[in-house]
Amino acid sequence: MIDEVIKMKQNKNIVSIFCDETDSTTFLEGYIYAVGVQKFLIKHITPHGLADGYILKELDSIVHLETGGKYERKIEKLYHKKNQKHIDLEIDKNSDLEDNILQICMNNEYITSFEMVEDDECPIKGTIKELDSNKVIVSKLTEDGEEDGEAVLKKENIDLIAFLGVYEVYIELLWRVNRSFYLK
């Protein structure tokens, strides 16, 4: 599957990526931004054609890909007609893609959502406080942007990383409002 994902990146095609064998209504939509040895990074786009940040996911999770279809063409038209753009990221091609993304998120204090293997119902969201080769320490935030303790995540159990998306930006706005309120 890695060859197909690399081809999608090179062709700059919008792609639908299905990662759940039991649910064909759930998929990632957008442009492939980077491909690593084990993971890919997609510029995610909503069903309404809006830029929705980035999602990092395992290549092995891909069940199938679709491109060039009616749906993908519709999303591409909406994305361009609405003049949507994603922030460009400085990806270091010589380092591990996941480590690179985690470092970018930590350095920029991006609100980041993590889905863990076997537990995609309760994503962990917040800012990355610390990183090492085995774990990520997250200063957790609630959906209302309030601080909610810390989580220590084993890297090997992280299934998905999302950042700069509509959901994360919403939480970040509330978090910044809460921080400025408490600083007064």
Image: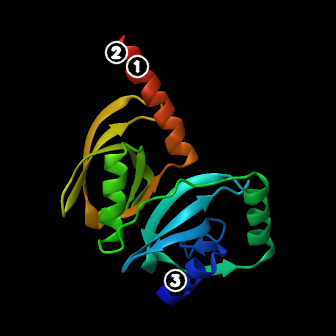
Circle 2 packing at 10 Å, graded few (<14), some (14-19), many (20+), is few
Query: Which secondary structure lies at badge 3?
Result: helix
Query: Which secondary structure lies at badge 1?
Result: helix
Query: Which secondary structure lies at badge 2?
Result: helix
From this viewpoint, which residue is outermost toward the top? Answer: 184
Name which residue lies at 74% across and 53% down: 48
Residue type at mark 2: give it.
Leu
Q: Quadrant of residue 109?
A: top left
Q: Which residue is mark 2?
A: 183
Residue type at mark 3: give it.
Ile
Task: Give me the C-alpha separation between circle 3 and circle 2.
Answer: 47 Å
Residue type at mark 1: give it.
Ser
Look at the numbered discs 2 and 1 and tell me whether their residues touch, using CB distance below 8 Å.
yes
**First reached walking from the N terminus: tag 1 or tag 3:** 3
**Residue 65 position in % (x across, y down):** 61, 80
Q: Which residue is mark 3?
A: 6
Task: Give me the C-alpha separation between circle 1 and circle 3.
Answer: 43 Å
In the rendered image, the vertical position of residue 82 relative to residue 23, given as above or below: above
Name which residue lies at 34% across and 30% down: 147
Q: Which residue is mark 1?
A: 180
Name which residue lies at 47% across and 72% down: 34
**Residue 119 position in % (x across, y down):** 39, 58
Residue 176 placement, left or right of 84: left
